[in-house]
Image (spheres, rainbow, N blue to C red):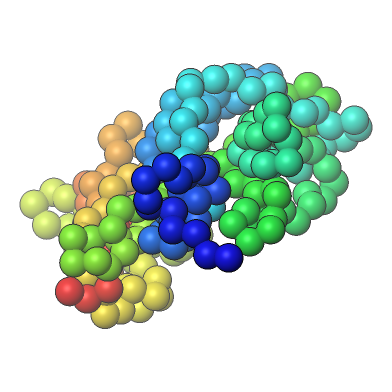
């Protein structure tokens, strides 16, 4: 038996839509918003936004989640969007996990017989009172370039690199973070760069970010600049 779905009187199901959307873009992640921040104790705020999982779009209202606390000592924690199409009453939920070792993510193909897909929004450390060291996951889905190439994002945590200071010009300080070759971006078309998030920053003014054809760097910093986490987002596509 064969059925033509786009035809008078046919019933187009959510599974039909999801399979089609996933064919055009099989990525799962957030489309906009959904930023995660720590409000104190075990409260985690997830901003309003949208996302896509296996061709299924979800809409999230601004909400506060109470993270699962550790039974004893400290544990690893994780915040997830979980789709379970076998749960007819609540097929999508925000859930948290706490364990000495976090389990592997369940990411089944919902369009090929799978039932559960977990999209990580953040990881953190948790004890019996509060969450700490929250780090948002890199699950943003950049749009598709007009010529059909995917617009992609590379996240660079400056804290993981040794800054190479260059001669000051006009009172400004320049620091090279990493070469494009080190970041695996050689031959890519760089569309721009912007600040993602930062932590443990010891200066009053945030530096500007620049990208040349050779490296990624920072401007208007002092040579005493330090941080525990400073994220640069580089937007790029394959050469056009």
Residue 217: x and y in percent read 28, 60
In the rendered image, the quadrant that contains the C terminus is bottom left
**Residue positioned 69% across, 22% down in the render:** 66
Residue 140: x and y in percent read 43, 48
> Can I make out residue 119 in this image?
yes
1 to the left or right of 181? right
Tell me: residue 150, above or below residue 226.
below
Residue 223: x and y in percent read 33, 52
Tell me: residue 12, above or below residue 26.
above
Tell me: residue 169, above or below residue 38.
below
Residue 183: x and y in percent read 40, 71
Nearest the viewer among 182 and 85 is 85
**Residue positioned 43% across, 35% down in the render:** 50
**Residue positioned 59% across, 19% down in the render:** 64
9 to the left or right of 147? right
**Residue positioned 18% across, 60% down in the render:** 146
88 to the left or right of 140? right
């Amino acid at each position: 038996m064969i059925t033509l779905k786009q035809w008078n009187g046919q019933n187009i199901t959510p599974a039909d839509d999801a399979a089609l959307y996933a064919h055009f873009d099989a990525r799962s992640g957030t489309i906009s918003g959904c930023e995660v921040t720590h409000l104190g104790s075990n409260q985690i705020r997830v901003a309003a936004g949208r996302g896509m999982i296996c061709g299924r779009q979800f809409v999230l209202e601004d909400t506060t989640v109470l993270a699962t606390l550790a039974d004893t000592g400290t544990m690893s924690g994780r915040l997830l969007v979980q789709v379970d199409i076998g749960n007819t009453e609540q097929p999508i939920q925000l859930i948290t996990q706490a364990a000495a070792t976090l389990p592997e993510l369940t990411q089944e193909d919902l369009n090929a017989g799978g039932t559960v897909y977990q999209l990580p929004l953040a990881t953190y450390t948790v004890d019996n009172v509060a969450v700490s060291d929250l780090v948002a996951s890199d699950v943003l889905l950049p749009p598709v370039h007009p010529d059909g190439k995917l617009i992609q994002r590379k996240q660079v945590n400056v804290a993981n690199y040794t800054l190479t200071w260059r001669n000051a010009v006009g009172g400004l300080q320049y620091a090279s973070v990493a070469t494009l070759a080190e970041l695996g971006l050689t031959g890519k078309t760089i569309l721009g760069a912007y600040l993602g998030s930062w932590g443990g920053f010891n200066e009053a003014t945030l530096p500007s970010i620049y990208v040349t054809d050779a490296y990624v760097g920072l401007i208007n910093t002092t040579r005493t600049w330090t941080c525990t986490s400073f994220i640069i987002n580089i937007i790029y596509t394959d050469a056009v």
